[in-house]
Amino acid sequence: MTAEKLSRRKYLKYAGAAVAVGAIAAAGYGVSQYYRKPTTTTPTTPTSTIATTGKKKVKIGGTKPFTGPDALAGISEGNSNKLWAKMVNENGGIKAGDGNTYEVELILYNDEQKPENVPRIYEKLIVEDNVDFLFGPVWGPLGMATVPMVEQYKKFEIFGTCSFDPKDYRDWKYIVHTITNGPHYMEAILDMIWERVLPNDPDAKNIAITHGDDAFRGVAGGYGYEYAKQKGFNVVFYDTYNSSATDLTPMLTNVKAAKPAIYLNAGVYGDAILLMKQIKELDLNVKMVWAGTGTVFPKFYESLGKYAEGCVTCTQWEKGINYSQDYGPSAGDFLTAYQRDYNEIPDYHAATGFQQGLVIQRAMELSDDPMNSESIRKVAGEMEMTTFYGKYKVDPETGWQTGHKMGVVQWQNGEKIVVWPMTAGAKELWYPLKNWSER
C-alpha cells in the first residue's frame, strides 16, 4: 500500500475502517451495493510521488485501478494526473487566491479495481499522508467507495471517470464531478441518430439496446433505454446480461431475430470485444453498432482490425473535438505533452485526469482560503470554465456535472473520427455499415 509495507497493526486498523464503512453505507450513504468485505491482501505499492522543491505545496492523493479489468482506464487517468502536476510545477506552481504560490505533490495508489480496498486507502491518504485534496478513482463502484471517508473527514474530492446512479445520491457535500454522468452516456449517440441519420433513413428509428448488469453498465444502458423511448425510438429489443458473461450468443441470437437497424450496447472493453466477435460469428448485420465504451481504446481496433471499422462510441473527449476555451492549455499542448511523456495518443480517460487537476487549480486560484476543503468546494460549485476538455459547470448543491457534453467518434481507416456534435468539427459519418460478408 505504501513504499514500505504496512505493519500488521496498521493494516488491521485500515481493514477495520473499511468494515466500518460498510456499516455507514448500509446506514444511508446509498453505497452499500458497491461495498464488499475487505480483501486480506495488501494493495500494491503506489506510483512514484510527484515531489516538490520545498516551497509551499498542496498535497493531492487518490487511487486508480493500475491493475484489474479496467486498468487501461486507470493508467490513462493516472498518467494525466501526473502530467498535470508536472506541468503545474514546471510553470512555477498554482498562484492561489491568498497570494501564495503552491507546488503540487501527488500521491496515487493502486486500488486493484477492488471497492473493498478503497476506503482504507483513502483513510490512509487523509490520516497518514495528510493530503489536502483528493482525486477520485476510475469506475463508479470505486468512486462510491470513497464517499463515506470523504464525508467523514470533510475532504474535497474531484471525481474523474466515475459515474453512478443519481438515485444513490445522499446529500454529499465535498464531491464535484468532471464527466457527463452515466445516465447520459447513450444520449449523444441517440441524439446523433435522431438528428443526423433518421432524416435520411426512417428505418434508423428501430433499435436494439442491451447492457451488462453491474452498476456502470446498468446505469448507462438502463437510462439510455428510457431516453430512447422518450425520444421516440422504436426499441425492438431490450435485454441485460451478466457483466462477467463469456458468451453472449443466446442474447445476440435474439437481437438478430428482432431485426433492428441499429444496435446499441452499454458495455466496457471486455464485453465490447466479445460482442463484436460474436455478432460477426452470428452474421448479425446492422447499419450502426455501439459495442460499449471500450470501443474508444486503440486496443479495440488493434484487437479487431478491419472488423472495428465503422464502430461508433460516445466519448467524454477526443482528439478532434474542438472547443472555444477560456482556461488551461490548448488541446494541442495537451496532446503534445501527453505523447511526449507516454508515447501514445491520449484517450478520454487521460483527458479526464487532466481536467481533475484543472478543476482544483482553478478553484485554488479563485479562493482566498485555498487549502480549505469547505472553501474549495464552494468555489468549485460556483465557478464555470471551458478547457480543452469542454465545459465545466456543476450544480452548486450536488456537485453533478451539468455543463459538459459528450461527443461521438467512429473508427474510420484505423482512426477515431469525430462525428458528433456538429458544432465541434464533426466529419462524415459512415452509414450504413457494410454487411459482414462484404467487409
Image: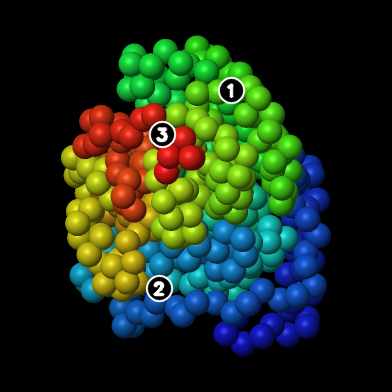
Tell me the residue that label 1 is attached to: 259
Secondary structure category for the residue under label 1: loop
Q: Which of marks 2 and 1 is nearer the N terminus?
A: 2
Q: Which of marks 3 and 1 is nearer the N terminus?
A: 1
Whether tag 3 and tag 1 are in contact, CB under 8 A, the answer is: no
Q: Which residue lies furthest to the bottom in this view?
A: 4
The foreground one among 327 and 189 is: 189
Query: Is residue 44 toward the left or the right of residue 16 in the image?
Result: left
Q: Which amino acid does label 1 sit on?
A: Lys
- The picture places residue 204, in percent across and down from the top left corner, at 45, 19
Which quadrant does the N terminus fall into?
Answer: bottom right
Secondary structure category for the residue under label 3: loop
Q: What residue type is labelled 3?
A: Leu
- 70 versus 409 height, above or below: below
- 277 versus 41 height, above or below: above
Tell me the residue that label 2 is attached to: 105
Query: Is residue 338 toward the left or the right of residue 233 in the image?
Result: left
Residue at the spot x=66%, y=74% of the render? 43
Q: How many marks?
A: 3
Q: How far apart are marks 2 and 1 (CA)?
A: 55 Å
Q: Which of marks 2 and 3 is nearer the N terminus?
A: 2
Secondary structure category for the residue under label 2: strand
Q: How far apart are marks 2 and 3 (CA)?
A: 48 Å
- The picture places residue 344, in percent across and down from the top left corner, at 34, 66
Which quadrant does the C terminus fall into?
Answer: top left
Q: Is residue 63 visible?
A: no
- 119 versus 50 height, above or below: above
Tell me the residue that label 3 is attached to: 433
Q: Which amino acid does label 2 sit on?
A: Glu
Residue at the spot x=59%, y=29% of the render? 209
